[in-house]
Image (tube, rainbow, N blue to C red):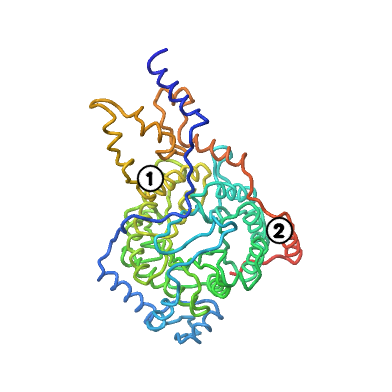
Amino acid sequence: MSDSKQRRSKRRGRGADKTAPKRQVFYHPIWNTLPRAEALSSDQVETIHETALRILEELGIRVLHDGGRQILRQAGAEVDEDSQMVRFDRGLITEMVAKAPSQFTVKGGAANRDLPVGGNSLMFGPGAGCPNITDTERGRRPGALSDFVETTKLQQSFDIIPKLGGSIEPQDVPVQFRHLETTRVLMTLSDKVPFIYARGQGQVMDAFEMTRIARGVDEETFRAIPYTTTVINTNSPRQLDVPMTQGIIDFAEWGQVLVITPFCLMGAMAPITVAGALTLSHAEALAGVALAQIVRPGAPVVYGSFASNVDMKSGAPAFGTPEHIQSNFGAGQLARHVGLPWRSAAGTASNTADVQGAYETQLSLWGCVLAGANMVYHACGWLEGGLTHGLEKFILDLEPAMAIAEIMQPLACGPDEIGFDAIAEIDPGGHFFAATQTMARYQTAFYEPLVSDWANFGQWTETGSKTATERAYEIWKRTLAEFEPPPQDPAIAEALDDFVARRAKEGGAPPVD
């Protein structure tokens, strides 16, 4: 046998040692231990903040929801019913934002699923809200309920994703029933924190009741503890539509988590400069946070920011760009300036799970992490600027997310790790493969990749010369085949089925425009 084959044989034999200790990891919660990157001076942060207050005070924001305008008027805002414009005294904004908690915990379906938000907490969320889905076996297609089931199973299977997201829209389910079917999937296939779309009070109330059924809590408990989250997107520039305003009111009243996120594309829905987009986004986020606190002081809210630029040749959104990353740095500074936990997003404009998709996602992901975001949305699976969710892309994106989680682990630096005895054991010019320290630790010392193949060229060729995308395909297929839902009282599933059947018979709940 050749030397190279002997080395490969020994390496395989070591990997097959079933008696050796295995590396155990659980990537939740993650605490961000890195210094925060900053794009702005403290004076510039203050100037942007003051300009945002001036925008709200002098220019205002259009609120299309009649009840929302009434709530704001009663709180002291200036409302023009003819134009539906609302102007806020800066003192009102400052007072209301100060009432929002800087940290809170969202309750999961199991003790180890609780989600801390704020401070140094860090979580990665899946690519969400996509109308299409793709994989190498079935190609690109409109999302269906069966796809929603698969993406939920994949999210449940990897603890690096602690909070569920609606990865795709199941377009084979009529919109008045879609929230019932998707919420049932989330509640029966996962015990992680669920996501609920704010698409009208009827749909939100149905989803809240289904959450209470699944978690076994009454209305009083549900109002006291956050169990769910939603995203509120302003209609930049300077507008809150009816379902988003209603969503702020409903989630705040029930004490559930609002992630208030302006989506500002520089040169399209926002000024073409990073500073201008940050200023507009900051103003819109503060207005949403203020409304939530007027409805219920102390309601859990997350300051959201998702600003990037467009391709000025086509008008298409771009992600993972230098401007996207700079905006993350600035948004983090602004969120800390007002003392709120905050959400950002990764992403890519790539149309497939290729190198562009990888580097744009990773650049934007690192931008969020270095900026100190507590919630990083669209970290796994997002393609085409959010038009498509990719199954191979989801698996591929898990790798850098898990590597970042490993980086955040405390670095052991005791006497054994510093290793004087290990160094003394090996003669100059020797090697540490058989050192006492190495033999005691080799099974658990290093991060074990999910997708990456660290074999040499010969081994890689012998096993089929598979690309990372091909390996990702095999991983999601195997994960779905081996999936087992978390344990749940059968009576809960039965109660959810009964609720869905009753509400479907009653006509469901159409979304509100």
Q: Residue at x 65, y 65 (%)?
A: 212
- Residue corresponding to mark 1: 359
Question: Which of disc 2 and disc 1 is earlier in sequence?
Answer: 1
Asked whether, in this view, residue 226 is left or right of residue 379, the answer is: right
Q: Amino acid at mark 1?
A: Tyr
Q: Give the camera-side residue of 23 and 99.
A: 23
In the picture, the quarter occupied by the N terminus is top left
Q: Give the camera-side residue of 27 and 207.
A: 27
Q: Is 109 drawn above or below residue 155 in the view shown? A: below
- Residue 46 picture quarter: bottom left
> What x and y, as percent, mark residue 156?
57, 49
- Residue corresponding to mark 2: 492
Q: Residue at x 27, y 33 (%)?
A: 423
Q: Secondary structure at mark 2?
A: helix
- Tell me the mark number nearer the camera, choosing from 1 and 2: 2
Decide: marks 1, 2 in contact (CB < 8 A)? no
Q: Is 75 drawn above or below residue 138 in the view shown? A: below
